[in-house]
Image: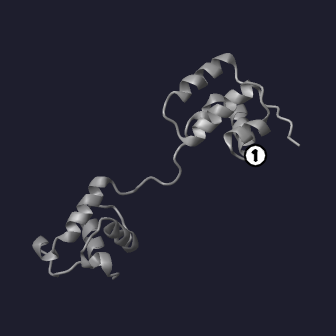
Amino acid sequence: MARPLTVRQPTAQQLRRIHRFLEAPLEPWQRRRAEALLLLAAGHPATFIAELLQVHVNTIYADLHAFARHRLGCLRPARRRGARPRLSTAQLKAIWRLAELSPLTLGLSFARWSLAKLRAYLIRKRLVRAISREHLRRVLKKGGSTCAAGVASS
C-alpha cells in the first residue's frame, strides 16, 4: 500500500520552468526529478511514477520531498563536497619538472632525489608551503615520474 503523499503540486509557472529545464542537457538524477514533478502535476501517485521511471518508490518520495523543501532548487546540482586541492596545476607541473632534473644540475651535492630531500627543496624554494613525503610520493606517481623519489620512500 502506498504512503499518503502530502507534497504540494508545482504551480503553472514552475511547470513552465521545468519544461524549459528539460530542454537542456542534464544529469540523470536531474531529469528523473523533473519528470517526477511533471508526473506529480499530472495527478499520478508516487508508486505509478516510480514504476514508470523504473526507480524505487522511496527514490520518488525523496525527490518529491526535496521539491517540498527546496522548490525548484532541488533540480540544481549540490555543491561539491570535500577539501579544495592544496596544490595548483602550476605547482604540480613544477614539482614534476623538478623531480625529473638531477639535483646536481641545481647545484646540490647529491645525484638523486629522495622524497625527504625533494620535499625539503620544495619548501626551501617556496614552491609549496608544506607537503608530506607521502603526499609528495602520490603527486609524483600521479605525474608519471620516473625519478627515484617517486619509487623509493625515504
Q: Is residue 51 left or right of residue 17?
A: right
> Quick one: 120 or 105, which is closer to the camera?
105
Three-letter amino acid code of the residue under disc 1: Asn
Q: Tell me residue 56's x, y (percent).
A: 73, 47
Q: Tell me residue 114's x, y (percent).
A: 27, 79
Report the residue at 31% width, 79% height from top. Answer: 151
Report the residue at 23% width, 70% height from top. Answer: 99
> Quick one: 117 or 32, which is closer to the camera?
32
Q: Tell me residue 85's x, y (percent).
A: 41, 55
> Quick one: 34 or 79, which is closer to the camera?
34
Report the residue at 69% width, 45% height from top. Answer: 55
Tell me the colour scheme of the image.
Answer: one colour
Q: Is residue 45 visible?
A: yes
Which residue in the protein does label 1 denote? Answer: 58
Q: Tell me residue 61's x, y (percent).
A: 75, 40
Whether residue 134 is situated above or below residue 95 in the rendered picture: below
Q: Is residue 139 left or right of residue 33?
A: left
Q: Is residue 78 visible?
A: no
Quarter location, residue 97: bottom left
Q: Which quarter of the figure is the C terminus placed in?
A: bottom left
| Label 1 SS | helix
Q: Which quarter of the figure is the N terminus placed in?
A: top right
Q: Is residue 74 left or right of residue 100?
A: right
